[in-house]
């Protein structure tokens, strides 16, 4: 048995080459920590060459060299193993340390293989590779190729090792030296490097930007796929070696080249600049480009790295946003942009003007800070509605910085942009509309009371023949209790189709001709056949715009029955209206009691007289010619006529004349029915009066005032004299309304109207109420400016005196603006505008005063 501390016989053969081997090992030891494969291979080559000297030193004294080699073998930092004829002849300390196997446990190479390669399939694969490598080296006299394998240590740990084998046998014996180099760390580094490379490639391919890199000669070294597609290439590999002058963007190539050279030469990046690039279809797109120098750790320039993104759509959106913002600033309508929390993040100038705040003061506020009716608790629910893309409309009130409150209509919308949610809100001041609506409601209530008391059907339709309003008689005729039940309906909803179409045709005819018409016709209803007399007329506003039609209708079945009875018997004579029967020469043959009651003529006084005894002289010859032409051609005539009573009073009458023919077809008689329409005319006059006068103060309204202003201005221009226009606004009127109620406010307006009217002495002068607490005074002719000032002063002092309403003592004042024709304006618009401006000047001067325009 060999000594424990001795080395195998094969190891003794190193004695002669010991000094050389020591030097080589020391040289290697100084570099072993670099851990690269070449060190192991070089070491094995050195050891192999050293063995050649063994054959030269067989006969010499080798003891000292053998001892030295033994020391080096044991101290060598890499695991070493010497095998001879598939037996393990020796291992060094590093081997035992690395693998945990003791020398005494290792005898045969196969035993070592089984312990370090526990997977049989893998073990056989390694043995096969190693054997083929040995045979190849022996047959070709070339070095044995190292093997990279995974080996299991005694503790079960698996390490990746590089096995470098060298042939030590100089005779027929098989002897090898195996050096084991642990490359586990290097393998992991290579694996991590490969993984990093794959990740980097994936990042470059998935990044939402175009990426490329060029050499210093500005040829492409690489890029991602989307960049290659932009260039017209199918893959990044087709870009390598090419330059910009060969790409689709050759028009911009020179510009790109200058940018690249600038980055390379200055070694400074050029970041975030915008430029154009040509597309495959010849169009242009906008890019935001970033270029950086590619420099090694030692400062060597490799080229340029570039990235760009397509910002064409972003540019378009930015342009649209700029236009939108400019439009919002100039639209004149208050605009707010609110965050999801309701915070104001943007307002336009109109919003600032409407509330009296600066932009800085409004930013950061919330709607509940300037809306007294909107509570912060209501915002979450409102925001939820907005998020559902509901367009929210609210009528509410806003409070100005000075505390004044005014009515507004708010329209809110929702938008989401770039992960930001907000609402954009438009606000419209509806104070004037609210005041007008209130005045209209009052006026409508008066008109409603009026038309509901008409004993016949009354309706108003729009241009589509939808009912806008009807009176109770009309609603009841269709078995509806309330007039409102018919609003929005058409005749097609109420009558048989043919009859409804007939009504619609009548409406279209009236609107087309813009002329009133009276129609008598029969209709089949649920209570039988009826004769209906209908008056229809177009509704036209002050500007001449057609709004619809208005109609009055009454059932004249009874009258028609009487007329029919007269036609049959020529003697039956009974009706509610006044009736008269004449011969073919218009000589009165018979009258009824209504005729006597209306005209004052008794039967004794009328019979034998001609119908001309009722002539009032109002109508001319042409009127009577048309009437008789209708009777001759159509057999009847009906219309409005002015006749004279026995008392001499002239009155309006609705007259129907029907020709009665005998069996021979010749006219034998005429039957006339007449209806005193004095009351109806009076009501029409009342309606006309209400249309031109303020329902509260009985003063002329804006429509009548505009007519008078137009006439007065035309006359002033013709006769070349001065004219005065005053705008008057009451001061401290709003607190009266707010504190004492609208009824007191209305009484105050009536008293104010009376006092102003008392200050106007001439019948040609006009005092009108425009609405709310605004009045206007027209002096159509003055001699000098002082005349206007005198009137303004009188009004001013009259309104300063105490008003007593119920138990309330009220003090107000007025601000009056004065414009004089022609110095302050030569047309209605300028005079109105300048008088209004002068009134606001009086307001700014402290209220309770009057100012001339320009003063």
Image (cartoon, helix red, strand yellow):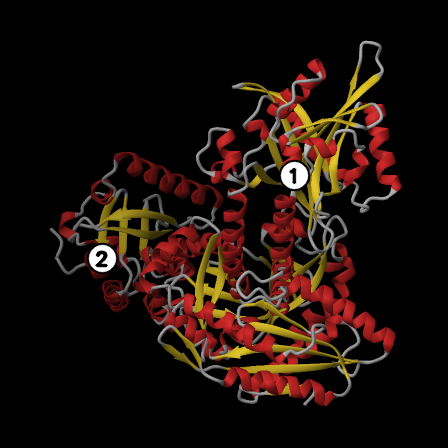
- Residue 548, relative to residue 553: is it above or below? below
Residue 213 is situated, as x and y percent measured from the top left of the image, at 61, 62
Residue toward you, 6 or 233 = 233
- The quarter holding residue 722 reads bottom right
Q: Answer few, some or many: residues within 10 Å of disc 1's Cα (few below 14, many 20 plus, some between 14 and 19).
A: some
Residue at figure coordinates x 75%, y 62% from the top left: 253
Q: Is residue 378 left or right of residue 643?
A: left
The label nearer to you, 2 versus 1, is 1
Residue at figure coordinates x 59%, y 73% from the top left: 775
Note whether residue 659 is visible: yes
- Residue 598: which disc? 1
- The quarter holding residue 265 reads bottom right
Q: Secondary structure at mark 1?
A: helix
- The quarter holding residue 514 reads top right
Q: Is residue 337 left or right of residue 385?
A: right
Q: Secondary structure at mark 2?
A: helix
Residue 78 is situated, as x and y percent measured from the top left of the image, at 29, 61
Residue 53 is situated, as x and y percent measured from the top left of the image, at 38, 61
- Residue 98: which disc? 2
Residue toward you, 444 or 357 = 444
Note whether residue 268 is visible: no
Q: Is residue 242 left or right of residue 471?
A: right
- Residue 74, relative to residue 135: is it above or below? below
Mark 2 or mark 1: name the one nearer the start of the chain: 2
């Amino acid at each position: 048995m060999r000594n424990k501390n001795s080395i195998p016989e094969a190891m003794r053969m190193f004695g002669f080459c010991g000094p050389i081997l020591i030097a080589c090992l020391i040289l290697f030891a100084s570099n072993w920590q670099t851990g690269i494969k070449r060190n192991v291979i070089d070491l094995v080559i050195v050891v192999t060459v050293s063995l050649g000297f063994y054959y030269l030193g067989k006969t010499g004294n080798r003891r000292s060299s053998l001892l030295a080699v033994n020391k080096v073998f044991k101290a060598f930092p890499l695991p070493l193993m010497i095998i001879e004829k598939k037996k393990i002849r020796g291992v060094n300390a590093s081997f035992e340390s690395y693998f945990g196997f003791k020398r005494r446990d290792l005898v045969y190479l196969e035993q070592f293989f089984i312990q370090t390669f526990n997977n049989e399939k893998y073990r056989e694969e390694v043995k096969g590779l190693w054997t083929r490598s040995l045979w190849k080296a022996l047959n070709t006299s070339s070095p044995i190729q190292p093997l990279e394998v995974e080996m299991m240590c005694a503790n079960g740990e698996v390490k990746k090792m590089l096995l470098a084998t060298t042939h030590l046998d100089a005779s027929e014996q098989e002897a090898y030296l195996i050096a084991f180099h642990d490359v586990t760390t290097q393998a992991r580094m290579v694996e991590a490097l490969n993984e990093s490379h794959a990740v980097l490639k994936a990042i470059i391919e998935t990044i939402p930007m175009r990426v490329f890199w060029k050499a210093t000669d500005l040829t492409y070294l690489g890029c991602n796929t989307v960049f290659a597609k932009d260039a017209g290439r199918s893959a990044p590999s087709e870009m390598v070696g090419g330059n910009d002058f060969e790409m689709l963007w050759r028009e911009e190539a020179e510009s790109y080249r200058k940018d690249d050279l600038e980055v390379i030469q200055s070694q400074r990046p050029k970041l975030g600049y915008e430029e154009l690039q040509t597309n495959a279809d010849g169009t242009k797109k906008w890019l935001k480009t970033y270029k950086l120098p590619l420099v090694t750790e030692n400062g060597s320039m490799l080229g340029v790295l570039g990235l760009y993104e397509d910002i064409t759509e972003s540019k378009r959106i930015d342009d649209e946003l700029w236009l939108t913002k400019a439009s919002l600033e100039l639209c004149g309508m208050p605009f707010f942009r609110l965050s999801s929390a309701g915070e104001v993040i943007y307002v336009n100038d109109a919003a600032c003007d409407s509330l009296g705040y600066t932009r800085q003061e409004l930013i950061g506020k919330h709607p509940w800070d300037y809306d007294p009716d909107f509570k912060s608790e209501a915002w979450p629910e409102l925001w939820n509605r907005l998020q559902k893309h509901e367009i929210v409309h609210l009528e509410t009130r806003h409070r100005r910085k000075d505390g004044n409150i005014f009515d507004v209509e708010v329209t809110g919308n929702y938008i989401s942009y770039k992960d930001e949610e907000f609402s954009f809100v438009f606000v419209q001041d509806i104070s004037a509309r609210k005041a007008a609506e209130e005045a209209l409601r009052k006026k409508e209530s008066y008109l409603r009371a009026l038309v509901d008391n008409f004993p016949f059907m009354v309706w108003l339709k729009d241009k589509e023949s939808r009912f806008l309003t009807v009176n109770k008689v009309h609603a009841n005729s269709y078995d509806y209790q309330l007039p409102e039940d018919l609003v929005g309906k058409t005749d097609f909803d109420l009558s048989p189709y043919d009859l409804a179409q007939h009504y619609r045709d009548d409406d279209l005819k009236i609107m087309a001709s813009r002329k009133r018409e009276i129609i008598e016709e029969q209709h089949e209803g649920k209570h039988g056949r009826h004769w209906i007399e209908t008056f229809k007329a177009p509704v036209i506003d002050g500007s001449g715009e057609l709004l619809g039609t208005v109609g009055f209708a009454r059932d004249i079945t009874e009258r028609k029955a009487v007329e029919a009875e007269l036609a049959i018997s020529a003697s039956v004579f009974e009706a509610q209206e006044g009736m008269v029967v004449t011969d073919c020469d218009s000589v009165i043959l018979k009258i009824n009691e209504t005729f006597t009651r209306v005209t004052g003529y008794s039967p004794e006084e009328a019979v034998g007289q001609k119908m001309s005894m009722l002539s009032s002289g109002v109508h001319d010859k042409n009127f009577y010619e048309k009437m008789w032409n209708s009777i001759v051609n159509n057999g009847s005539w009906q219309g409005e006529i002015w006749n004279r009573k026995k008392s001499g009073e002239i009155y309006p009458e609705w007259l129907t004349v029907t020709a009665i023919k005998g069996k021979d077809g010749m006219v034998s008689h005429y039957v006339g029915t007449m209806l005193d329409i004095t009351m109806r005319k009076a009501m029409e006059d009342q309606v006309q009066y209400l249309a031109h006068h303020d329902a509260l103060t009985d003063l002329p309204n804006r429509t009548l005032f505009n007519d008078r202003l137009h006439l007065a201005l035309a006359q002033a221009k013709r006769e070349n004299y001065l004219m005065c226009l005053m705008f008057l606004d009451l001061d401290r009127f709003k607190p009266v309304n707010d504190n004492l109620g609208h009824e007191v406010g209305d009484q105050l307006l009536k008293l104010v109207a009376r006092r102003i009217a008392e200050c106007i002495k001439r019948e040609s002068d006009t005092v009108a109420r425009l609405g709310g607490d605004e009045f206007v005074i027209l002096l159509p002719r003055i001699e000098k400016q002082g005349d206007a000032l005198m009137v303004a002063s009188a009004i001013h002092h009259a309104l300063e005196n105490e008003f007593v309403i119920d138990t309330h003592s009220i003090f107000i004042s007025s601000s009056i603006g004065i414009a004089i024709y022609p110095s302050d304006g030569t047309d209605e618009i300028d005079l109105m505008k300048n008088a209004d401006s002068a009134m606001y000047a009086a307001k700014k001067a402290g209220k309770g005063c009057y100012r001339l325009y320009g003063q």
